[in-house]
Amino acid sequence: MTYSSAHISSPVVAIDGGGTRCRLALREGRANTVVELGSANVTTNFDAAISVIIHGLELLSARAGITLDILSSFPAYAGFAGVAGPSVAKNVTEALPFSHIRVEDDRPSALVGALGMRDGVVAHCGTGSFLAAQINGSQRFAGGWGPVLGDAASAQWVGRRGLALTLEAVDGFCEHSAVSRHFLEKLSGAAGIVRFASTASPADFGALAPAITAHAAQDDPLALQVMHEAANSIADLLPTLGWKPGIAICLTGGIAPHYASYLPDTMQSCVVAPAGEPLSGALSLAQSFSEEIAHEHL
């Protein structure tokens, strides 16, 4: 993606607030200053998320050698996990110190970061999940509704599904495998699994997902079932967003790339590496927002 000289010269701030980590960046000219912190989900815990962002802005301003007041005067774009509507976006806008900020959910920045200007679809599966498409200049989004009502194929879904199948094996509805025995040992039996699940956060469930992907790579039956179910949920929905054979598919987030080999052959051949990360998408959207502001003041 190229930018005009005016586009590049205007400092902008970008925030990528995810359920597992939060990244903030200041772009001045062609140089980026970046800081990274922990989770910032404004629905799960609004006050904690805002506290993380304020701390991140303080670190960012210090690292850039400017005051927080100066940093807050730059146009900013923020994409947050958990921004499910205008009221949440408004609350975030009012809680942050920027004079000009656009707050959206984390899907647009992930889509723009992964695809840049090209057509394609994105299956983003981290702690949470969503699908997105950018085809013929039009964007569509699906999912991202959180762990209770959605987030199929996310890391937390994979971890939770792995535990559910383990308990089915305990009940004798399917055969035990190495991964079910792993979870029973790790969590002190079936009762321990129930205790863990009663208080586990999405990140806690997500932390179990690497055991699933590792065991699936060794042809563990229960782990393979979880991976196939997750990949099928992606494959079934992408066509409804406009995907057709030949259109690029980006698998982004911590666990999504693991699904590539479980997708149908027609989809596997379309999987491409993302052009960039959600933070780069947020920076691009911040620059577009800055141009809008400049145009309004002409």
Image (cartoon, grey):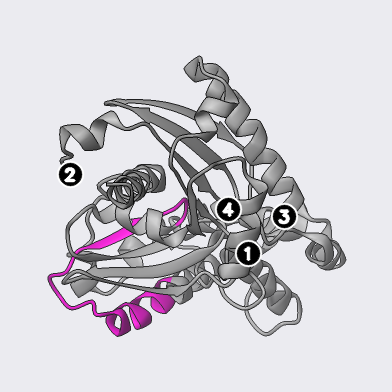
Whole-angstrom CA distance, mark 2 to mark 4, is 38 Å
Q: Residues within 10 Å of mark 4 (few under 14, many from 20)?
A: some
Viewer-nearest residue: 101 or 169: 101
* Residue 113 in magenta stretch: no
Q: Residues within 10 Å of mark 2 (few under 14, many from 20)?
A: few
Residue 260 place in picture, x, y as percent: 32, 61
> Which residue in the protein does label 2 denote?
1
- Please report whichever mark, 4 or 3, sits nearer to the chain's N-terminal start: 3
- Please report whichever mark, 2 or 4, sits nearer to the chain's N-terminal start: 2
Residue drawn at the location 31% of the way across and 63% of the way down: 261
Q: Is residue 49 left or right of residue 232?
A: right
> Which residue in the protein does label 3 denote?
46
> Which residue in the protein does label 1 denote?
88
Q: Is residue 287 left or right of residue 145?
A: left
Residue 175 quadrant? bottom right
| SS class, disc 1 | helix
Mark 2 and mark 1 in contact? Answer it, CB < 8 Å.
no
Residue drawn at the location 55% of the way across and 62% of the way down: 128
| SS class, disc 4 | helix
Establish if 98 lies above or below 168: above
- Please report whichever mark, 4 or 1, sits nearer to the chain's N-terminal start: 1
Which numbered dot is residue 211? Answer: 4
Q: Amino acid at mark 2?
A: Met
Q: Is residue 144 left or right of residue 147?
A: left
- Please report whichever mark, 3 or 1, sits nearer to the chain's N-terminal start: 3
